[in-house]
Image: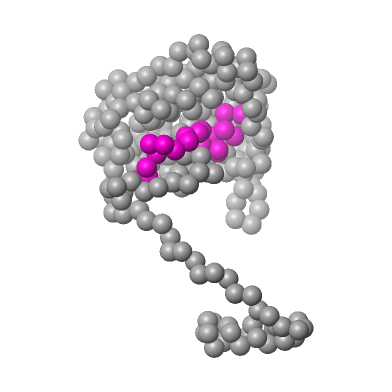
Amino acid sequence: MDIIVLIKQVPATEIMISIADDKKSVNTDNAKLVMNPYDELAVEEALQIKKTHGGSVTILSLGTDKAVEAIRTGLAMGADNGILINDPAAKDCDGIGTAKILAAAIKTIPHDLIIAGQRAVDDDNYTAGPGVAEFLNIPHISFVIKQEIKDKTIRCTQTIDGGTAVVEAPLPVLLTTQRGLNEPRYASLPGIMKAKKKKIETKTLADLGLDPAEIAPKTKILEIKFPPQRKAGRMIEGDSAQSKAAQLVKALREEAKVI
């Protein structure tokens, strides 16, 4: 079972971010960068499948030199190979462009299964995973919380509005992760040491036979800005619940004008 895991390096969610001077991007110069949390679920699931069915796990990412750190995290968890697509021409591509690049790389790698995070927490773009499946012309199952592979068929339980659904698809297939699928492991010290010695293959768009014009963004960011600061909350005072309720209703009617 040859598995490819798609990962992205993103700013850690607990840090305070700043907007770059161009007002169209986030300044990550001094930000702590980590593997996208949903991609950690993907790596863990790939490793569990490998334990059951054998094979290999390859980490694939599109990014700059810094993305090597995220790939090594996957290698330290137990993945076998790492590939980074690093090309300045891909810096500003959108989700569809990213999907086209990743799909071109995947076509050169033996695979039975592709696992990706449902989204990246930096741009909340859900298109990369499904886009890769579309460009590869293979089935795609999203928001997976459970999977079982048997006789070259995968059966997945996925979350949907109001509940869950169970679906099947023949391999190869691409699935995206949802919280509850597993609990990602921490990289062990021996795993970290081994990961440092593993070679990460680097490719460019030219290596994949892609022209920069093919991955030109379909969307344009006009401006990034923080949401307006919320006003401080107001406490309703009173001697009883009835008194507080009366004051609240009056404020909602006369001040907020919502009732």
- Relative to 92, residue 235 above or below: below
Q: Residue furthest top?
A: 197
Magenta residue span: 25-44
Residue 10, visible in the rendered structure: no
Residue 215, quarter of the rendered image: top left
- Relative to 137, residue 249 above or below: below
What's the coloring here? one colour
Of residue 86 and residue 31, the one placed in the foreground of this image is: 31
Residue 110 belongs to the span the image colors magenta: no
Where is residue 233? Give x, y as percent: 58, 71
Where is residue 103? Give x, y as percent: 39, 30
Left or right: residue 11 compared with residue 212: right
Of residue 171 and residue 77, the one placed in the foreground of this image is: 77
Q: Residue furthest right?
A: 240
Residue 40 belongs to the span the image colors magenta: yes
Residue 234, quarter of the rendered image: bottom right
Residue 22, visible in the rendered structure: yes
Where is residue 244? Give x, y as percent: 70, 83
Q: Residue at x 65, y 49 (%)?
A: 164
Q: Residue at x 30, y 39 (%)?
A: 92
Of residue 134 and residue 10, the one placed in the foreground of this image is: 10
Image quadrant in which the C terminus is located = bottom right
Image quadrant in which the N terminus is located = top right
Left or right: residue 82 compared with residue 90: right
- Relative to 204, residue 147 above or below: below
Where is residue 142? Give x, y as percent: 54, 42
